[in-house]
Image: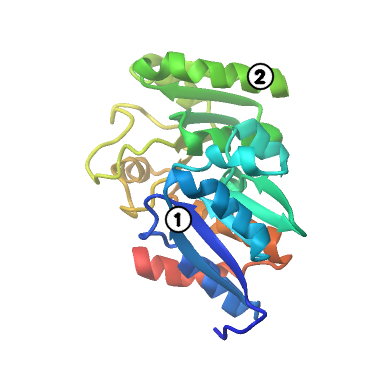
Amino acid sequence: MKLDGYTRLAAVVANPIKHSISPFIHNSAFEATATNGAYVAWEIEAGDLAETVANIRRYQMFGINLSMPYKEQVISYLDELSDEARLIGAVNTVVNENGNLIGYNTDGKGFFKSLPSFTISGKKMTLLGAGGAAKSILAQAILDGVSQISVFVRSVSMEKTRPYLDKLQEQTGFKVDLSALEDVPELQARIAESDLLVNATSVGMDGQSSPVPESIVLPETLLVADIIYQPFETPFLKWARRQGNPAVNGLGMLLYQAAEAFQLWTGKEMPTEEIWQSLTEKYQ
């Protein structure tokens, strides 16, 4: 990578962020597409967010990615929001269009792109969890024409989740069904009629726990996905594969949300296959 007076910057902004693999993905893409860009990680304090966003204009950057805890806080510093960012209420990509800063959320798009030969349009989905990743998957599924969504959260989180789903219904006219994870018969009934089951919780990152009881029986054509990619195979995915179901981890979501951001910044397609190779070697 040659840096010169014309090199444009992009960055990922979060706290903590030093462990991020986004610089690896984007710098590989800049190099592979002969784009004069460099991508860095900025670990900032909350008090520096406004200034950091102002620097996108100041330094004529491509833009920035955002991760926890700034995906919601950044919105008040932006000029415009895309449809999905407005529905999700969070931004993971800011694009600098000649000084006009536009917020997007590419997480949901990236997630659905990562599912092999699967389209959500007209299908039924069961979603575990209602955090940031779950919201992006939910909103994108609705925009893409999903026919039915069942969301399961722990009973203690039900009241916290309901206002978001109500707001979503107000904005889209789509009613999402909400149930408690502890209600195993209901969970089994919903999964039995689903085309896609997604774990959007962090349960399984320890390599030990699973968000659903092992007693659940999966319909044989169900596609199972986990947004976690470390460990590469969570107990949840192992369990699904033991039942003979196709199962996908979260590494593809990470790559394809980055590819969407890269295209918004540069107008170029990220060579995902090439980068996917080096990613799986790194993380498997």
Q: Point out the frontmost of discs 1 and 2.
A: 2
Say which residue appears at 53% left-offset and 42% top-offset. 71
Say which residue appears at 60% left-offset and 60% top-offset. 259
Instruction: Decide if residue 217 is on the left or right side of residue 23.
Output: left
Say which residue appears at 37% left-offset and 41% top-offset. 240
Which residue in the structure is indicated by mark 2? 169
Task: Find the residue positioned furthest to the left.
Answer: 208
Which residue in the structure is indicated by mark 1? 251
Residue 58 place in picture, x, y as percent = 66, 62
Taking the image as drawn, is residue 15 in sight? yes
Amino acid residing under circle 1 = Leu
Q: Quadrant of residue 69?
A: top left
Vertical comparison of 253 with 179: above or below: below
Badge 1, how many Cα within 10 Å: few under 14, some, many 20+?
A: many
Q: Secondary structure at mark 2?
A: helix
Measured in 3D between alpha carbons, the distance from the residue under mark 1 to the one under mark 2, in whole angstroms, is 30 Å
First in sequence, mark 1 or 2: give its number.
2
Vertical comparison of 190 with 13: above or below: above
Amino acid residing under circle 2 = Gln
Vertical comparison of 148 with 4: above or below: above
